[in-house]
Amino acid sequence: MAQSSTRYEESRRSILSSRDARQAVLDWHLGAGRTIVALSLAVPGVRKVPPGAGALFAWALREIGRAFPGAERLDTRIDALGPFALWSTETWPDAAKARCVALEACRPAARLLDLDVYSPEGAPVDRASLLLLPRPCLCCDQPARECIRLGAHGFPELAARARELLAGLGA
């Protein structure tokens, strides 16, 4: 039992450290007068790079390059939270968010992408600011935040759905 507890604490510290490092690089670039686009994967569970996740991330990198010609990639890494990349673009924030929402919806596995947009002043740009519906749940058509808040789906169901989406990539 003590060994399991130690592994949990190590994993927890690693995840928290990764969050802090990501936030630090984001903070460094926020407010610099350009729109920032952050890409990560929203894969439930401890294993953040399961089979297919690398292919999805590589696809997303290419698609972001197409969606934001001339964007500068500021950072790319893989940490305890999985893969992460950050871009700076001249694209107007609302237009950038609209492109990101379209990318998240363009194929089933893209539902596992998490694309965040920040204005040149550093403010997050969300779906509501574009009068868009909230992001749907991974397992049903309800808003994801509501399902998370209510605990509507257990971890096994969420993880199975993510594996199913990633398997559809053929990777």
Image: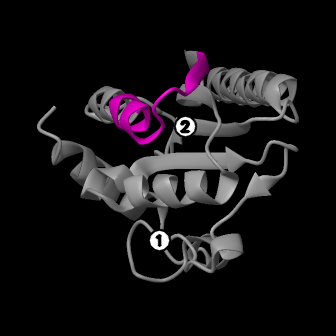
**Residue 61 location, x and y as percent?**
40, 29
Left or right: residue 109 versus residue 20 is left
The residue drawn where x is 16% and y is 48% is: 168
As drawn, the label of residue 137 is: 1
Q: Residues within 10 Å of mark 1 (few under 14, many from 20)?
A: some
**Residue 97 location, x and y as percent?**
58, 56
Give the distance between the C-alpha atoms of the residues marked 2 and 1, in whole angstroms: 19 Å
Tell me the quadrant of the picture where the C terminus can be found. Answer: top left
Asked whether 65 falls inside the magenta stretch, the response is: yes
Three-letter amino acid code of the residue under disc 1:
Cys
Left or right: residue 131 versus residue 67 is right
Up the image or down, 161 lies above or below 113; here it is below
**Residue 167 location, x and y as percent?**
18, 44
Of the numbered discs 2 and 1, the one sitting upstream in the chain is: 2
**Residue 63 location, x and y as percent?**
35, 37
Residue range (magenta):
61-75
**Residue 149 sits in quarter:** bottom right
As drawn, the label of residue 109 is: none
The residue drawn where x is 46% and y is 45% is: 43
Is residue 44 in view?
A: no
**Residue 6 sits in quarter:** top right
Of residues 24 and 152, the one nearer the viewer is: 24
Asked whether 83 falls inside the magenta stretch, the response is: no
Q: What residue would you read off at disc 2?
A: 39
Left or right: residue 88 versus residue 110 is right
**Which secondary structure, mark 2?**
strand
Numbered disc total: 2
Three-letter amino acid code of the residue under disc 2:
Leu
Colour mode?
one colour
